[in-house]
Amino acid sequence: METSGGKSKGRISLFKRIQNFIVHDVWSVNLDDYPPIRSRMIRYLRILLLAYRGFVEDRVLLRASALTYFSLMSIVPILAMAFGIAKGFGMDKYLEIQLRQSFQAQGEIMTQLIDFSNSLLQRTGGGILAGIGIVILFYSVFKVFNHIERSLNDIWNIKKTRPFSRKLSDYLALMLIAPILLIAASGANVFISTQLTRLSDKIEWMAYFSSTVLFILRFSPYFFTWLLLTIIYIAMPNTKVRVKSGIVAAILAGTVFNITQWIYIDFQVGVSRYNAIYGSFAALPLFLAWLQISWLIVLFGAELAFSHQNQNLYEFEKESENISDNSRKAMVIIILNRIIKQFIAGDKPLSSGELSKELKIPIRLVRELLQSLVECNILTQTITVQPKTYGFQPATCVDKLTIAYVYNAIEQSGTEIKLNNPQLDRIVGIHKVFMEKISELPENILIRDI
């Protein structure tokens, strides 16, 4: 019994050590102190842990459900646009064949969607999208892109969306690029395979190369999916995303997406069970499930891109989660001091990422403190030379920014509650006198002089 109890305690102790390492220790080590291989393994573990945490905290399941709904509402205009572009390349028939082959488990619903999209094209001019049809089409796709941007901005902890003019230009570009890549990922495979078969029948020596080309073509959907996701992860968030981070996330998410699609469609997971329950309506829940899983993979890829780019900024973050008001105020002064000195020197405004890296403060804490300084009109957000990168500079004369001035501005930020309570009014008056006394102290120096 004692041996069994000792083993049980040992397992619990081992579990606690592993849990403590994952939650705390992995973020409280300096990677420069470890050999390259171990340092790289810790870095990869950080990326996965940070992506998983973001997946939970950013409510990715809920966001994927919302995107599934908006995608479903816009599926006909999106398909109409895809077929319109495919028709321009003479590949509309190949796109239809590929869609029907890819969605064999949802054959009924795919037939209806293709018929609806073709009907929309015919009503708007037989391939030339004009008039009211083009307005409906672009509005529907615009709404989907807008919700994608908002979801990615939340993942990157960006509160401000891009201006409408930027949205219009960027979304129009994506409306043209995305269907082309989707067509390339689906219709190109069928198109080239068909042409190779025809050429092999006419030219004898082509048969020797056709098998090799067809083998390479099997991987073309992966490449075009990676390319499309790379564009989404880099272009959609209203912040600067490193190309390497976008590519790494796109390769991982795109690979999982294609493997999941292959498993789900080719093996038709759960078709017989759903047919028994839903009958002829089985296509709808299966299609919704596929759409939901697809958005989950895409959004988790965005979490991976954020984690890959920012994992080093989360060192010692656990200690900063329960940070005291005293430490928070000290960090406000440190950040403000650095911004003011940059402003006085006439250099370009610093971004939240640059401040986080230079001052070694977790990026989310830096953004939170900067947001509080913007809200109390101490700082203002400015557009920098780099696209989608925002800097910060003083919004108040630097000769007025003393320590007490900043503390008082932060404390007075927000809405004051007016209550008919004499005791509360007396305490507010005492606090006001207290802050005035602090401002008279010799230690209340200008932040620029620290």
Image: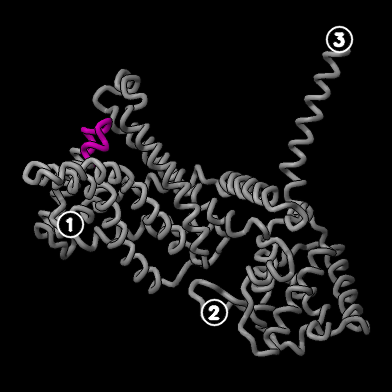
Q: Provide the residue span drawn in magenta.
A: 99-110
| Nearer-N-terminus badge (3/2) | 3
Residue receiving disc 2 = 384
Q: As rendered, which of 232 and 137 lies closer to the eye?
A: 232
Please tell me whether residue 107 belongs to the stretch shown in magenta. Answer: yes
Residue receiving disc 1 = 84
Amino acid type at circle 3 is: Met
Q: Residue at x 77, y 40 (%)?
A: 20
Q: Position of residue 169 (x, y in %)?
A: 34, 71
Q: As rendered, which of 195 and 324 lies closer to the eye?
A: 195
Residue 384: image quadrant is bottom right
Say whether marks 3 and 1 touch (CB < 8 Å): no
Q: Residue at x 15, y 51 (%)?
A: 92
Q: CA distance from mark 1 to mark 2?
A: 38 Å
> Which circle marks residue 146 in the picture?
none
Label 2's element? Answer: loop
Q: Position of residue 88 (x, y in %)?
A: 15, 60
Residue receiving disc 3 = 1
Residue 171, compared with residue 28, is above or below; it is below
Q: Chief secondary structure of the magenta span?
A: helix
Q: CA distance from mark 3 to mark 1?
A: 74 Å
| Nearer-N-terminus badge (3/1) | 3
Residue furthest top in the image: 1
| Nearer-N-terminus badge (1/2) | 1
Colour convention of the picture: one colour
Quadrant containing the C terminus in the rendered view = bottom right
Please indicate whether residue 159 sits to the left or right of residue 291 in the image: right
Q: Residue at x 36, y 24 (%)?
A: 270
Please tell me whether residue 27 belongs to the stretch shown in magenta. Answer: no
Residue 159: image quadrant is bottom right
